[in-house]
Image (cartoon, rainbow, N blue to C red):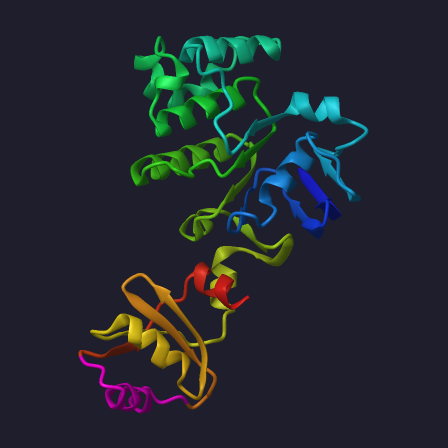
Amino acid sequence: MSISVQNISKSYQQLKAVDAISFEVNEGELFGLIGPDGAGKTTIFRILTTLLLADEGKAKVLEYDVVKDYKSIRNSVGYMPGKFSLYQDLTVEENLTFFATIFGTTIEENYDLIEDIYVQIEPFKNRRAGALSGGMKQKLALCCALIHAPKVLFLDEPTTGVDPVSRKEFWQMLKRLQQKGITILVSTPYMDEASLCDRIALIQKGKILKIDSPQNIISNYDKLIYDISSKNTHGLIHDLKNYPSQYSVYAFGEFIHYIDSKKDFNPSDLNEYLEHKKHSEIIIQPAKTSIEDVFMDL
């Protein structure tokens, strides 16, 4: 077991950021903490990387206790915080050399770990880190987190604020790193990234709502969701919320996602109701369930 968390809690004054959370990450697994800002993801990362003490509970990383064995953990893991935290006045190469030296290694010694990533930023190796684009900054930060060959990699919202192409490239890199035997714990507010993990924990307001593989979470969801649209989207949301048997109504891209509380729900009855409410160009069709749908319901 690479990571073990047992009933961890942490409060900031009156705010309970993490509330009795427990989960485990297997060796070589790509595990995701999925939830919005303020859900408690960063607090969990800081506890596991020995930067913050929990109020209650226990946690281990690579069988090391996060309190007693903090030095061993710091030597064995790589941590990429949500905010870019490298030296912006140093060049790409200087940053990487600095972090390699801190851990008593060299770029050459562990180059095979970062090669796929570094070749993309090598043309800018003499550019100061502060002058890099968002995607390039993330790649440099990942190289610095990997340069000492960590056994566990902690990535706190690594793709926030990064363009879609760079996001896709970043996840491809994570898959390649996983194939090299590195355990990866990643957090993200993007629900579409959940499907790229082996297992995920859906988290909200400091509590874990569900832990399973993305496929199991979706396949075990037992409610039928409908895509609904009309010419008057704003009025549609209002009228659907006032439909007597509605269970859930929320915007989802170009459609409204609607769930009815009746087992024998008939879309024709809803269509008739919307026509009575003066809606036109009505579309009612079954929707494909996503992680975001399950999260909204939970």
Residue at 56% across / 21% down in the picture? Answer: 149
Q: In the figure, is residue 107 to the left or right of 10?
A: left
Is residue 244 visible in this depiction of the protein? yes
Chain part drawn in magenta: 265-280
Q: Is residue 222 above or below residue 63?
A: below
Give the quadrant of residue 53.
top right
Q: In the figure, is residue 51 to the left or right of 58?
A: left
Residue at 38% across / 12% down in the picture? Answer: 128
Whole-percent x, y for residue 63 in the image: 75, 34
Q: Main secondary structure of the magenta part?
A: helix
Give the quadrant of residue 73.
top right
Residue at 72% across / 46% down in the picture? Answer: 11
Could you say which is closer to the camera, residue 256 or residue 292? 256
Give the quadrant of residue 117.
top left
Whole-percent x, y for residue 280 in the image: 19, 81
Whole-percent x, y for residue 246 in the image: 44, 82
Asked if the stretch drawn in magenta spans residue 271, the answer is yes
Q: In the figure, is residue 130 to the left or right of 181?
A: left
Asked if the stretch drawn in magenta spans residue 266, the answer is yes
Whole-percent x, y for residue 258 in the image: 38, 75
Residue at the farthest front position: 14
Q: Which quarter of the image is occupied by the N terminus?
A: top right
